[in-house]
Image (spheres, coloured by chain):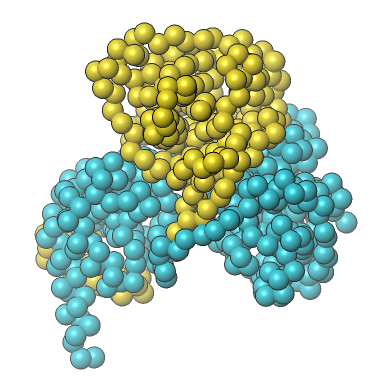
Chain colours: A cyan, B yellow
Amino acid sequence: MSGIAVLVDHDRGVPSGGALEALTSARALAADMSADLDAVILGDGDLFDAHGADLVAICAAYGAAAVHCGRHQFLADYGPDAWGAALAEFVETAAPLAVVAAGTDRGAEAMAQLAARTNLPLVANCVNVSPKGSPADASTAPSAGGAWHVTRIQWGGSLLEDVTLTSTLPLLTIAQHSIEAEPREDGPLPAAVADFEPDLGPEVQQTLVRDRVTLAEGVTLSTAPVVVSGGRGVGSADGFAPLEELAELLGGRVGCSRAVTNNGWRSHADQVGQTGTRIAPEIYIACGISGAIQHWVGAMGSKNILAINIDPEANMVTKAGYAVIADLHEVVPAICDEIRRRRDRPS
Amino acid sequence: MRILVCVKRVPAVGSRINVTDDGQQVDTAHLGFTTSPHEECALEEAAQIIERLDGDDHAVVVLTLGPEASAEQLRYAASVGGSEFALVIADGGLDWDPQRTAVAITSAVRELEAGGGQFDLILFGNESADGGNFQVGIRVARALGRPIVNGIKGIDPHERGFIARRETDAGYEVYELEAPCALGVKEGINLPRYPTMKGRLASRKAQIQVLDCAADADAGGQSRIRLHRPPERASTTVQLGDSAAAAPAVVDLLDELGVL
């Protein structure tokens, strides 16, 4: 039986957070269509030996009825051509009803490769998908016969776009952080594991990862439970020292706005926003950040936001759940002192 | 060396994006326009690669598809390192979905190569600031039969092609592509320069070649119904204080959230 196929993007055997969100989203779509949820994982023999059982267990927990393991030596590590070609071969033989992936770097890229190879439309960064015949909101438009109705994000999430998708095989990526990853409520399904061996030509080797350099160990901006971020109000590169200290005390990471990277105060790798990293920490502490829309869309996935700003009218302040209206240069060191005072206090 | 940079004209939006009454586009009545940020960096990168080379037999060709007014972005490109400029005028009445866009750009690249020779490297932005479809560059590269990697934040030419670095959470991945190839670039790869006086003069003199290949492209399978703003997060801001004396309240909050 053909189902909704989900490409589970992973980095050397560790699935991305987005992949779990995509599985969650596709499970609802499969239920809508009374279809099965099928996971697709790409790797080589060594990768499946080391991580296969874990990956299958994760897919089963998220409701996959079958896990298709694409095995090939060129899939030992990531490569957009290798992944795109393997996916194209999978859809040709398995004939799924739709293919879904996360809107992560790898998910988005592999799906675009698949779309280019099959010349099919790809709707990127969807937040709501209604299959044929059940438009999410009948008032939005004259229903296009047989088309799917999809809502996707534009401008990094500042705008939504309702589109119709007319295709023999709908291809979709799910916007990151648009849905909470949730395993199947009734426990894992006994997922059937099926191997396939795509026929990959040597040309796909051109875009395989050749090498990698690790710069940061431990928590990263996108996984940190706390992000302490600074904007123009920090005033200088040195001004970030108290923010660094607060982040360290909380086991978090320091982020920044585009104004900061444009001034050369911090590396672009720290930038939160539409053209930087999208974060979803437990709390985002935004210090001296006005909250331009391009920044907001990177931060809006945060579960809680505390804005520290002298301007009570700043966008960041009015959108935040919590605010301190004062100079960050006084408030941040005071917070650090208070944390240390409580930790030193015998309990 | 010949490098092609594909850029897109996008509205320079402020703290809120408004949509026209018919829901078909961003209301730009009170907005200026700019080059999509990833692409501004792609152009800067091309200019820097060329500047490091010996000789003057090199070109940074800048291509855009959009309304006639997109010439503004090409003139700007002339002031920051572009050397040749081409415009595909897109009929504003059509739905320029990613497939149609990719077909038109592919024809434009073929026409430019027929006239001036093959591009060693084609640079795209990772995604456009507005549509954000994450696929046009990949579709074009595939149609031209060239390898492409997206998300690139570092490029170094080597003997037969280019070494490209892609940022990950923990560091970066290294790719090695043979020319001719394509790369999707991300902001942060460089800090784009500001136009100089000499650049402004070049901008005024820039010749823009208008390519007639928009009509070749048929619509793809994605069709816009309407744009709208997401519901505002109903937020009441709890003010924890107006001085450093707010610190205990902040730490109480951190404790409550379990991050202390």
Q: Quadrant of the C terminus of chain A?
A: bottom left
Residue A246 relative to residue B131: left or right: left
| Quarter where residue A75 is shown | bottom right
Q: Nearer the viewer, residue B198 or A196?
A: B198
Number of numbered callouts drawn: 0
Residue shown at the point (42%, 32%) measured from the top left: B53
Instruction: Residue B236: give x, y in percent of width and height.
Output: 31, 52
In the rendered image, the vertical position of residue B200 relative to residue A267, given as above or below: above
User: Outermost residue, front direction?
Assistant: B55
Q: Is residue B145 left or right of residue A190?
A: left
Residue B63 position (above or below residue A254)? above
Decide which of A119, A82 is in the foreground and name it: A82
State which quarter of the image contains the N terminus of chain A.
Answer: bottom right
Q: Residue shown at 74%/39% (left/top)?
A: A117
Q: Position of residue B58 (x, y in %)?
A: 47, 24
Residue extending furthest toward the bottom: A346
Q: Quadrant of residue B41?
A: top left
Measured from the top left, where is residue A104 in percent x and y? 56, 51
Q: Position of residue A252 (x, y in %)?
A: 34, 67
Residue drawn at x 19%, y 63% is A242
Camera-nearest residue between B180 and B191:
B180
- Location of residue B51 with respect to B32 vertically, above or below: below
The answer to whether residue A97 is left or right of residue A293 is right
**Residue in view at x 24 percent, y 42 percent:** A263
A78 to B227, vertically: above or below? below
**Residue B253 seen from this side:** no
Evaluate whether residue B209 shows in this view. yes
Closer to the camera, A239 or B171? B171
Which of the 4 image quadrants contains residue B101?
A: top right
